Image (cartoon, rainbow, N blue to C red):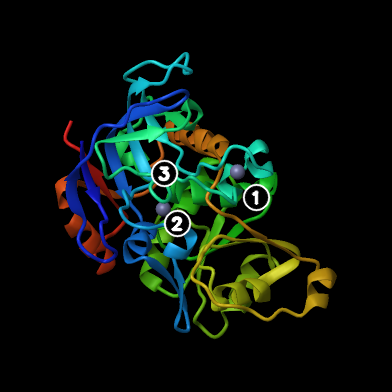
Amino acid sequence: MRCYCVQEHGAPLQQINLPIPEPQGTEVLIKVHAAGLCHTDLHLWDGYYDLGQGKKLSLAERGVKPPLTLSHEISGEVVAYGDQVADLAVGTQALLHPWIGCGACRYCKNEQENLCLKPQQLGIVKPGGFAEYILVPHPRYLVDLQGLDPAQAAPLACAGLTTFSALNKFGAQIHQQPVVIIGAGGLGLMALTLLKAQDAHGAILVDIDDAKLQTAQQLGAIATVNSQVADASQQLNALTDGGAAFILDLVGSRSSLEFALKTAARGAHIVVCGLMGGEIQLPIPSIAMRPITIQGSYVGTVQELRALLDLVRERDLKMIPIQTRPITEVNQAFDDLQQGKVTGRVVLLHAS
Ligand SMILES: [Zn+2]
Ligand SMILES: [Zn+2]
């Protein structure tokens, strides 16, 4: 099978030929149709995460070394499976849940594989979608694609799931109060779409870019605030009757979280899933006395991915604009993403 592999960090991906893997036991062999390119793939290609202030987190230290087959946003069809798999039809179209754990630890046993300390994620630790075929360790990681386009659905496994899981942390209260969303980029617009699809009270989008805020307004935000104007927090206070009860921080920087804390109401719930980085200083008594909840959110579970696909199917949601390209253009796609030339998501298609 053809595989487009990172043989050396930062160098163009190489097309190499590898044997088609043979599924054993509970494993399922998938023929890949579509594989999304995410910002995380750029970090994996580079070999490090930039933590700011000259600090770098090396991926080799975390056991991620070339050769790498990237892409964790994968859809395809079942072509074979091991002898311990029952009730699975060859030809089934599926989106793959990539956030796979070890299967044995307390998180994995509690259906929180995305929190596993020995992760086996597809396209990060294990081979991903930039190859013609991929092995999945168990059929439970296949989410039925019935009625959905494989390329449109691919980014739901990462960007879509991250946003959906973060919003789920607020629970049913989203029907009573607006959610303030910090960051009106791709994830912010997805969060807005998901809130509308769940008939939530509404979303107030915050960003530093007026053009993005205008798009959010057109897509149905109940209000928008540019956080760089002098009276931004007063504006937000007025819009939320004296302080935001629910804040989703999709940026995750010092300035975004400081803004969230400044505009939070008493008893507010702040969910952080942005990873821009930095650190904050927070007076401890304010946590108790205000009293606020700051919660993190990292990707999501396979149950959430199933629920997300059901919602997208039922409400016919357009979650993220995609551009499709043949897999042979994968290196140009990396260059374009790195140079900021991509709006939405690039999804690479394998020849059928
Ligand atoms: Zn585990
Ligand atoms: Zn991703």
Residue 272 image position (x, y, % from top left): 59, 62
C-alpha distance separating marks 3 and 2 = 21 Å
The disc, 2 or 1, on the residue closer to the chain's N-terminal end is: 1
Q: Is residue 269 visible?
A: yes
State the mark number for residue 187: 2
Residue 145 image position (x, y, % from top left): 39, 29
For badge 2, the amino acid type reads: Leu
Question: Is the CB of mark 1 within 8 Å of ligand 2?
Answer: no
The disc, 3 or 1, on the residue closer to the chain's N-terminal end is: 3
Report the quarter where the C terminus lies. Answer: top left
Disc 1 element: loop
Comparing labels 3 and 2, the label whose residue is closer to the camera? 3
Report the quarter where the N terminus lies. Answer: top left
Comparing labels 3 and 1, the label whose residue is closer to the camera? 3
Identify the residue shown where x is 51% and y is 51%: 163
Disc 2 element: helix
C-alpha distance separating marks 2 and 1 = 16 Å
Residue 336 image position (x, y, % from top left): 22, 63
Instruction: Kindly check if marks 3 and 1 are in contact, taking CB atoms under 8 A apart as contact.
Output: no
Disc 3 element: loop
Q: Is residue 21 above or below residue 158?
A: above
What crowding class fits label 2: few (fewer than 14 Cα within 10 Å), some (14-19), or many (20 or more)?
A: many
Q: Please name whichever residue, 305 or 45, is drawn nearer the observer in this view of the structure.
A: 45
Q: Is residue 72 above or below residue 264?
A: above
Q: Which residue is mark 3?
A: 122
The reply, left or right, for residue 271 in relation to residue 72 is right
Q: Is residue 30 above or below residue 81?
A: below
Q: Which residue is mark 1?
A: 169
Identify the residue shown where x is 60% and y is 49%: 115
Residue 212 image position (x, y, % from top left): 39, 66
> Which corner quadrant of the image does residue 94 belong to?
top left
